[in-house]
């Protein structure tokens, strides 16, 4: 697994990653679990890897599932419970994989997964069938094949580096991939999905920030960085500095969260997170309904609970703070917005629900082929827009 990490210097992010907690004994020695739970933690780790770097440990205030960060990173016996509706590959990535390392569900964009290694192995991970299972990094030949697929697929306007976490790659490896993608004429926009700024802030060096900001030549081919932060406590002072380093370089920043029971399924937890992100120049992008990954039922809310939450947030926080609540349909049919329905039709009439749930009548539009004289649209002043 450490093959992706070059020679290690003391105090570097690579050294921090190498020293991360992994075993049941590590967790017990750090006081995260009772020593008698170490064997159970090892059983869970056999199903899905454990890795907690030192700086993420700083975000844990108390040992136990009541702590949102502990719950996100420390293995729990519930992960061994697999429910019948749960799936190995919940969003059917494998069925949409034209070449190893590439997932494509849309005409204009595709995922490129150069590694399945991460800085932290999140206990709710939707890609746990592939992530943290050894064999993490694409081999040289596979990466070449993935890049050729992208180069010959001229409809691809955007390439999304994900995984795994692409920022566990060395700067050299990452620079090479970004340069190769930028050199493809039809690829205009790049994206990196990463949890590193929050869970391994030391990774965000000035060199990395410069690399992501990219050359000033035209066309710019920007890298949009999409963070993954679920709780305001993950935004430690070091994480905030890492985010500032990217924002100060002009790297556009978004955030996606997963809606997780016991982590961020209250209006208060969401409000605190969303406000802080916007204060840090990060635009909340998606709130994902938790996928049907195996052994994650203790994290899943109902869709109705999620809808109630986003309805309450709509009334409570600035539009800048609002993420789109989305469900990635099982079977690989893509993401669908599942926020509360606000448009209702009754007897040919349209009613729109406001943030507090009251319904308001909304007049019908004039059909494009309708003669305004006949409809009286001009007479009542309704044709202006
Ligand atoms: C989620 C996903 C994307 C990105 O979707 P956006 O709505 O553009 O953020 C692209 N491709 C695949 C296969 C995905 O699963
Ligand atoms: S960082 Fe993403 S891919 Fe990695 S374990 Fe967490 S959720 Fe899974």
Image (spheres, helix red, strand yellow):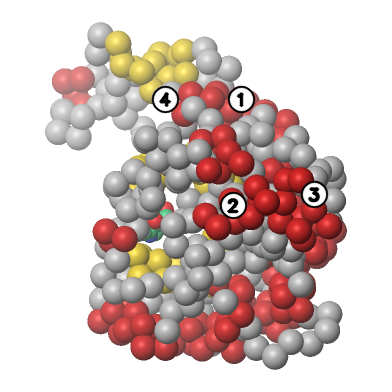
Report the disc number at residue 43: 2
Ligand 2 lies under 8 Å from the Cβ of mark 3: no
Label 3 CA crowd tier, 10 Å (few <14, some 14–19, many 20+): some
Q: CA distance from mark 1 to mark 2?
A: 40 Å
Determine which residue is flagged by label 1.
312
Task: Decide which of tag 1 and tag 2 comes sooner along the chain.
Answer: 2
Element assignment for label 2: helix
* Of the image marks 1 and 4, the number of the one nearer the N terminus: 1
State if disc 3 and disc 4 touch (CB < 8 Å): no
Mark 4 near ligand 1 (CB under 8 Å)?
no
Which residue position is annotated with label 3?
35
Near-viewer residue (380 or 160):
160
Query: Pointers 2 and 4 in contact (CB under 8 A)?
Result: no
Residue 93 quadrant:
bottom left
Residue 173 occupies which quadrant of the picture? bottom right
The tag earlier along the polypeptide, 2 or 4, is 2
Disc 1 and disc 4: Cα gap in Å? 13 Å
Q: Is residue 333 visible?
A: yes
User: Which label number is shown at residue 341?
Assistant: 4
Q: Residues within 10 Å of mark 1 (few under 14, many from 20)?
A: some
Answer above or below: position of 36 versus 93: above
Image point (56%, 47%), residue name: 124
Asked whether the beta carbons under mark 1 and mark 2 sit within 8 Å of each other, the answer is no
Measure how far apart labels 3 and 2 are at the Cα level: 14 Å
Mark 3 or mark 4, which is nearer the start of the sequence?
3
- Dot 4: what SS? loop
**Which badge, 1 or 3, comes first in the chain's sequence?**
3
**Location of ligand 1 given as a quarter of the image:** bottom left
């Amino acid at each position: 697994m450490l093959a992706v990490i070059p020679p290690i210097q003391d105090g570097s992010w690579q050294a921090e990653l190498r020293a991360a907690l992994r075993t049941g004994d590590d967790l017990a020695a750090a006081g995260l679990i009772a020593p008698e739970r170490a064997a159970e933690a090892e059983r869970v780790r056999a199903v899905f890897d454990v890795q907690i770097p030192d700086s993420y440990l700083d975000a844990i205030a108390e040992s136990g599932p009541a702590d949102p960060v502990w719950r996100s990173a420390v293995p729990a016996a519930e992960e061994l419970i697999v429910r019948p509706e749960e799936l190995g590959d919940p969003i059917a990535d494998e069925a949409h994989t034209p070449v190893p390392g590439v997932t494509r569900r849309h005409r204009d964009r595709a995922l490129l997964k150069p590694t399945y290694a991460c800085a932290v192995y999140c206990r709710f991970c939707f890609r746990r069938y592939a992530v943290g299972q050894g064999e993490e990094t694409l081999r040289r030949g596979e990466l070449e094949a993935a890049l050729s697929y992208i180069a010959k697929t001229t409809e691809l306007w955007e390439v999304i580096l994900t995984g795994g976490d692409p920022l566990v790659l060395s700067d050299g490896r990452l620079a090479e991939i970004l340069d190769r993608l930028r050199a493809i004429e039809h690829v205009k926009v790049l994206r990196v999905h990463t949890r590193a700024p929050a869970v391994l802030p030391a990774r965000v060096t000035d060199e990395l920030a410069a690399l992501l900001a990219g050359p000033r030549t035209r066309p710019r081919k920007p890298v949009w960085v999409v963070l993954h932060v679920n709780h305001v406590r993950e935004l430690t002072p070091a994480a905030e500095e890492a985010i500032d380093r990217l924002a100060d370089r002009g790297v556009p920043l978004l955030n996606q969260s997963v809606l997780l029971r016991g982590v961020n399924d209250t209006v208060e937890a969401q409000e605190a997170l969303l406000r802080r992100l916007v204060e840090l120049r990060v635009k909340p992008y998606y709130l994902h309904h938790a996928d049907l990954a195996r052994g994650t039922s203790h994290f899943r809310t109902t869709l109705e609970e999620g809808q109630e939450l986003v309805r309450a947030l709509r009334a409570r926080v600035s539009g800048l703070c609002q993420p789109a609540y989305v469900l990635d349909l099982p079977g690989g049919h893509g993401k669908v917005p599942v926020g509360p329905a606000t448009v209702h039709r009754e007897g040919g009439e349209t009613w729109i629900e406001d943030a507090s749930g009251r319904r308001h009548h909304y007049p019908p539009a004039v059909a494009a082929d309708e003669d305004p004289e006949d409809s009286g649209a001009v007479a009542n002043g309704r044709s202006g827009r």
